[in-house]
């Protein structure tokens, strides 16, 4: 957003917290919706999936722990520091997660994160969801820059970033600790006005 004086506007505090987290429609009846306490089983399943565990640093011990994590997602929305959606099929079945971490309203930036459960992989859903959240963050919320980072050993996430319109900007050395040690990460970004 640009002011009448040509100076970039900041997203005002309260822009997120004053409204509820939106439900974002995807193709074929899929939607991005806020996580619910009864989605705890999907979160627990994700924490037990070897592929998700390989690339994402989170653990969930049991259903109670999963419900606490879901409650923290809602706290992050109210605190305007994060926005996390469940990727849900018709009927509400959760097949993945997508969200914005490290939201900086004053700085106009955030990081996109995502994972998919095994049954949802390979059909382009990560690309579709990433494009939709990016469009919401840049156009509706008014952020200026989104980053998407992934291990250089994760070519699938590199393809998602590129197909979703995120330009690779470089490699961050030793940027994230995974279970098998420190990984270099690719840094991709989209800024307001970039083609999708």
Image (cartoon, helix red, strand yellow):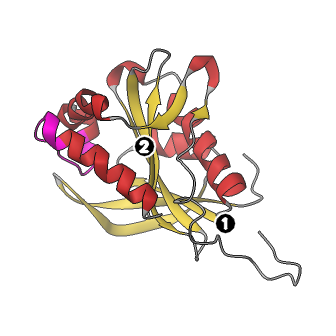
Q: Which mark is residue 144?
A: 1
Residue beneath the point at 57% across and 71% down: 13
| In the image: residue 95, left or right of residue 103 | left
Q: Is residue 154 left or right of residue 21?
A: left
Residue nearest the observer in this picture, 89 or 131:
89
Name the side, left or right, on which 45 lies relative to 137.
Answer: left
Which residue of the protein is positioned furthest toward the left in this rendering? Answer: 61
Q: Is residue 123 highlighted in magenta?
A: no
Query: Which residue has dot 2 on it?
Result: 114
Magenta span covers which residues?
Answer: 53-65
Residue 32 x/y as whole percent: 52, 34
Report the Cα–Cα distance between label 2 and label 1: 20 Å
Along the viewing direction, whichever of 43 and 15 lies nearer the viewer: 15
Looking at the rendering, which quadrant does residue 119 occupy?
A: top left
Task: Let me know if residue 59 is in the magenta part.
Answer: yes
Q: Is residue 164 above or below residue 36?
A: below
**N-term mark: 2 or 1:** 2
Against 19, is 121 above or below?
Answer: above
Residue depicted at x 75% and y 78% = 8
Residue 53 in percent (x, y) is at: 23, 41
Where, quadrant-wise, is the C terminus in this rendering? top right
Which dot marks residue 10? Answer: none
Vertically, is 152 above or below 106? above
């Amino acid at each position: 957003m640009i002011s009448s004086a040509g100076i970039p506007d900041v997203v005002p505090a309260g822009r997120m917290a004053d409204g509820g987290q939106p439900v974002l429609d995807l193709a074929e009846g899929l939607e991005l919706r806020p996580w619910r306490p009864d989605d705890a089983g999907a979160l627990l399943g994700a924490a037990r999936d070897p592929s998700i565990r390989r690339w994402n640093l989170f653990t969930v011990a049991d259903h109670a722990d999963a419900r606490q994590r879901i409650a923290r997602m809602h706290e992050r929305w109210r605190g305007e520091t994060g926005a996390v959606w469940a990727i849900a099929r018709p009927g509400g079945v959760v097949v993945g997660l997508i969200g914005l971490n490290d939201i900086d309203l004053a700085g106009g930036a955030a990081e996109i994160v995502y994972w998919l459960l095994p049954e949802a992989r390979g059909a382009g859903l990560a690309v579709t969801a990433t494009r939709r959240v990016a469009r919401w963050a840049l156009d509706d919320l008014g952020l200026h820059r989104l980053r998407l980072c992934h291990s250089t050993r994760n070519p699938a996430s590199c393809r998602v970033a590129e197909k979703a319109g995120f330009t690779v900007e470089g490699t961050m050395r030793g940027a994230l600790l995974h279970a098998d040690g420190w990984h270099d990460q690719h840094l991709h970004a989209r800024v307001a006005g970039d083609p999708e």
